Image (tube, helix red, strand yellow):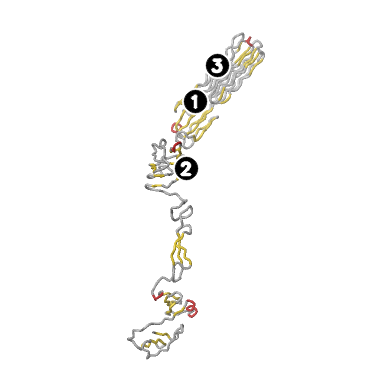
Amino acid sequence: MIYFYGAVDAQIVPCVPSDKTVWCFGSDGIIKTNPTSKRLSLKIPSLTTTQRDASFTSPVDGLLIFNSTNIRLETSTSGVWDGIGGGGGGGGITSLGGLTTSAQLFTTGTSGTGFNISSSGSTHTFNLPVASAVNTGVVNTGAQTIAGAKTLSGASVLSGGATITCSGCVTDANVVDTLTISSGNINGTPVGATTPSTVAATALSSSGSNTFAALPSCSFGLVTGVGGLASCASNSGVVIGVQRFTVSGTYTPTAGMAYAIVYMVGAGGSGGGRVTTLVTQSTSSSGGAGGGVLTALLTAAQIGASQSITIGLGGAAAAIGGSGNPGGTTSVGALLSCTGGLGGLSSVVTGNTVLANGVSGGIPTVSTGTLIMSVNGQDSGFGSKNTISSGISYGGDSGGGSMFGHVAKGPPAISGTESASSVGHGSGTGSSGSSSHLFASAGAVSAAGSNGEVVIVEYR
């Protein structure tokens, strides 16, 4: 063995040159007493880290010790102790992840919101969380909610009672290949084998493997009916808007409109004015006629970006003793039109003669579009033809009975009285006539007719 004189571990043995098994190392160098001996070893000072730092506060270069705390040889360089080997004198890693213990462990965990490595004590933990709405990580066999848009390319299969709840997200553009749903449902309804061409007429199965070869593009998403029928929310039959016009303006279709059904009526005419009469005279005027009525279908292409709406104005009130005025024409651009009803007439009755004929209603016309229903405006009623001796005269009824309104009855006038014209009830109706019976009357103007109207019901 070789002993160091003055060694700090107090392992001091006198150097005896006659000793055949010892090499001595002193201030005068190495003294070799038996160069052929096989029993040679070197005793290095053994210190704990605490002893090392207490003994060598500023170590010079080239010192060599055995650190019994870290189980390694250490040498000093530039005042710093560096390991040059582990237990048994071999080389190795002295620090990993900030840990310097001689024995270090590796394990796994699920902490954090993404992959991370946590080092503490003597253990390094590799964390891979379970994927969720906030974590990136492992997709496992349990129930999970995973955030972010996902694109599935190729043949994608959902099994085990898959549920797809989606509004407008299943479209031709989003389905690249084949979507297969086994024992699943869309928006809570079982789905099954179908294609766009049979989607509205094929009963869907709630079990087994059902394949969709590119689901149809649905503006309102998939809907289901009796027997589990699946289809797009109908592109012909779903009302997406109603626009009503009682004054002139511009019709701009609602976005997505495929076609519209238009209901419209022309304006009503005014009744005839009542003439001045003597006490020996009676008179009755006829009512104004109703505007034409029309229902028609227009496509989005026929309507275009917009159409001007013209609402016909009711016939202006007739002057005393004058004829009534016709109602104006209601139109949708140059596509559809309904003319107004004619104005009523006025007359004087003497003896047993009465003459105040009714007048004709307006006429509907379809220039572009599909006619559903058209009716000429209702003709007005005539003035009373009762004899003077009966004691009553009647003003003519107004025209205009339709889905938009109903007529105003002609008011009666008994002997010695007079009656006034009355307005119709609702759009497109005329005003009634008026009357007097054996009455000295100064005459009277009539009421005005009612304006027209347009109602447009839009469908996708």
N-terminal of the pair, mark 3 or mark 1, is 1
Residue beneath the point at 46% across and 57% down: 129
* Residue sitting at the far bottom: 18
N-terminal of the pair, mark 2 or mark 1, is 2
Give 447 or 150, whichever is nearer the viewer. 150
> Distance between the Cα atoms at labels 2 and 3?
62 Å
Numbered tag placed on residue 358 in the rendering: 3
| Snapshot quadrant of residue 198 | top left
SS type, badge 3: loop
Residue beneath the point at 39% across and 82% down: 42
* Residue sitting at the far top: 351
Amino acid type for the residue under numbered disc 1: Leu
Amino acid type for the residue under numbered disc 2: Gly
| Snapshot quadrant of residue 443 | top right
Q: Which residue is mark 1?
A: 294
Between circles 2 and 1, the one closer to the viewer is 2
Q: Position of residue 395 (x, y in %)?
A: 60, 16
* Residue sitting at the far front: 207
Residue 86 to residue 333: above or below: below
Neighbourhood count class around disc 2 (C-alpha, 10 Å): few under 14, some 14–19, many 20 upward: few
Between circles 2 and 3, the one closer to the viewer is 2
Q: Position of residue 131 (x, y in %)?
A: 46, 54
Q: Which residue is mark 2?
A: 188
Are the residues flagged by discs 2 and 1 in contact, CB closer than 8 Å?
no
